[in-house]
Image (cartoon, coloured by chain):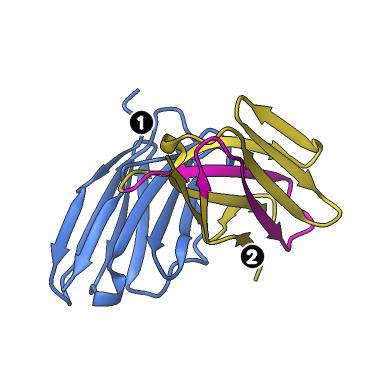
Amino acid sequence: GENVEQHPSTLSVQEGDSAVIKCTYSDSASNYFPWYKQELGKRPQLIIDIRSNVGEKKDQRIAVTLNKTAKHFSLHITETQPEDSAVYFCAASIHGNKLVFGAGTILRVKS
Amino acid sequence: DAGVIQSPRHEVTEMGQEVTLRCKPISGHDYLFWYRQTMMRGLELLIYFNNNVPIDDSGMPEDRFSAKMPNASFSTLKIQPSEPRDSAVYFCASSLTNEKLFFGSGTQLSVL
């Protein structure tokens, strides 16, 4: 079936450094790509999303880039802070009507 | 708005028992989703509704699972009979369209 692959599974960075998480998808019809942040014991929360007609979107310290030809998209977090530590999930719309999530990336920001 | 409300927050039951999870979506949201989260399988979509009608239940693992949405403000996910492998966090989410999902706090289910 359609799937979304996410890498790396864990990422450890020093406070102030940048973090990049990458996802690839298989459905060429996918047109919506959100990113969710889940803190320990909490619910996933949408942090940024992008549509297929846009190549890049930025919101303060976070940005998402999309390469439709290669079918991959990435989350970039700059100037990381300890409160950025969480699990991050990418997702892609499948068959235009439902989201399939990646396996998640555990981000640890060391102070 | 209080957001998506799920109950109970925690459920511990014995194998073979019936389990019912409940969800109240955000008022005005036409879409409701049930996801299951485990370490091994991540976030899996079980079923979703649009305007109270089930649209895609291909993620429901087997006949032991059933979901209903009798009205726009209430949905249930039922497992009967429950098995230890059903232990997981079950999330309900709602959205205005089928994109920006708002998740509830989840139900931590433990089947002994």
Element carrying mark 1: loop
- Residue A47 lies in the magenta stretch: no
Residue occupying image coordinates x 39% and y 66%: B39
> Chain A shown in which color?
yellow
Q: Which residues are magenta?
A: A13-40
Q: Compared with residue A50, is residue B77 higher up or lower down, i.e. above or below? A: below
Q: Which mark is residue A3?
A: 2
- Residue A29 lies in the magenta stretch: yes
Residue B76 as seen in the image, left or right of residue A74: left
Q: Is residue A42 visible?
A: yes
Residue A104 x %, y %:
51, 57
Q: Which mark is residue B27?
A: none
Element carrying mark 2: loop
Check the residue under mark 2 and report the chain it is in.
A
Extreme-right residue of the structure: A69
Residue occupying image coordinates x 68% and y 44%: A32
Q: Amino acid at mark 2?
A: Asn
Q: Residues within 10 Å of mark 1 (few under 14, many from 20)?
A: some
Count of picture labels: 2
> Chain B shown in which color?
blue
Callouts 1 and 2 on one subunit: no
Toward which corner of the image does residue A70 lie, by quadrant?
bottom right
